[in-house]
Amino acid sequence: MRFLFAAFILVLSFAAPASAQMLDTLAKNAYIVDFETGQVLLDKGGDEKMPTSSMSKTMTMYLVFEGLKNGKLTLDQELPVSEKAWSTQGSKMFVPINAMVRVEDLIRGVIVQSGNDATIVLAEGMAGNEGEFAAALNAKAKELGMMNSNFVNASGWPDPNHYSTCHDLTILAKALIQNFPEQYKYYAEKDFTYNNIKQGNRNPLLYKNIGADGIKTGHAEEAGYGLMGSAVRDGRRVIMVLNGMASMEERAAESTRLMEWALATFTNKNILHAGMKVADAPVVMGMERSVPLIVERDLKVTVPKMNTAGGATAQAVFKGPIEAPVTKGQQVGVVRVTVPNMEPMELPIVAAKDIPRKGFFPALLEKTERLIFGDRVSASSVSAPVKPVAEPAPTPVVVPAPVTTTPAPVPTAAPTTDTLPELAPAPAPATAPTE
């Protein structure tokens, strides 16, 4: 047995994608990815640990949505408000002490109003206390692959041991959207009224006409201003996490600028198609001398719309010759795709048809011949180059420069802060907090 390498060239040109573009941003940390392909479009300190402030509430909501999915919670279920939840400070939903509050109201209180009190009600209702809930948050984070995150509370209240990264938060955002499409709708709501107090969603992207439908803002003194955002245009979704901006105005301007850049500058292209033949593998002891090898699914990459240079190559790698019987759909190797400035990608390659084994005496004769004369089966070359999907002519894309001046403010219905001040066990005020 020996390895066969069948190489072929993808006749598709790309400009250098992703962080090679070196787009500047005022955010201290930034990580932008394409939802479908996972291609990183911008990485600025994406794996640096950072305080996550109220963006941590997205992790809390993941467990809440999971509870709804597995039946441990219902939307109409009511949970009690403890003194701890009622007295917690920072952004609030203003739940009354000792009241019973519907889970769906609490969900909106967390997502729209960024209520620290609401997160504690949910944490205590699901786990008994916030410490046990934090342990569940950490277990889920590890399960999702968020290896540089640690949670000590449900709200993101500042703590030296409470942190995550922009990269980890994009992993969380993708899992949230994929696993809970029905519940994700709450993130697009612009306002919510509870206890006769109307508060607007702090996410500035929701007030722009760019296809945004989530996700969460955050602010604390050490962390600065942050945002987890997602938007869809022409069926293509982008996820963005920014942190460390200097003001609410800077957050609004930078998040809008970067999301527009990510949506407008890039497109997704198929470079391998389900059922595409990539090689012919030699077969021994079979009724046929070779078997075609195919990929079972499409492979898309995210590339700039203005394709100017570079190229992609692919290589089918498998052990050969393959001994019969061969079963249709049997994996025999991989196709490795390399695109400039991207991590190499692999897709399984499988047999496209059944190849039955020869009968006893013909198989014995062939085996004897191979023992005497050696393996005389040679590798087949790839049958054809891979051709991309026809694309319209690219149109120029203007990338806006960083904005340092104050843009138009978020509508007055939206509150002005996610600030988490020092805990003070004072009763909640009668009106919504301001910065």
Image (spheres, rainbow, N blue to C red):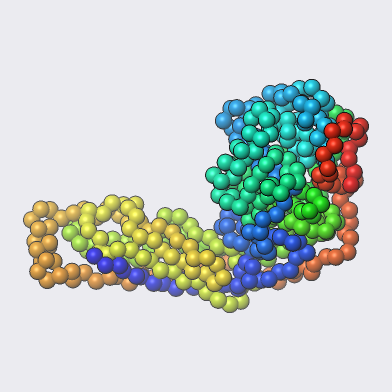
Q: Residue at x 76, y 22 (%)?
A: 100
Occupied quadrant, residue 20: bottom right
Give how far across and how far down residue 273 sits, in percent.
46, 59
Which image quadrant: the N terminus? bottom left
- Residue 236, compared with residue 135, is above or below; it is below
Residue 408 falls left or right of residue 254? right
Give how far across and how far down residue 158 sits, in percent.
75, 46
Give how far across and how far down residue 171 sits, in percent.
60, 51
Q: Residue furthest front?
A: 160
Q: Residue at x 57, y 57 (%)?
A: 38
Q: How many marks?
A: 0
Out of 124 and 308, give the one closest to the viewer.
124
Residue 415 falls left or right of residue 243? right
Occupied quadrant, residue 37: bottom right
Residue 6 falls left or right of residue 374? right
Q: Residue at x 57, y 30 (%)?
A: 70
Out of 397 and 342, give the one closest to the viewer.
342
- Residue 421, compared with residue 8, is above or below; it is above
Tell me if I can see residue 225 in this picture: no
Give how far across and how far down residue 182 sits, in percent.
64, 37
Q: Residue furthest bottom?
A: 309
Q: Residue at x 64, y 47 (%)?
A: 150
Tell me if I can see residue 83 in this picture: yes
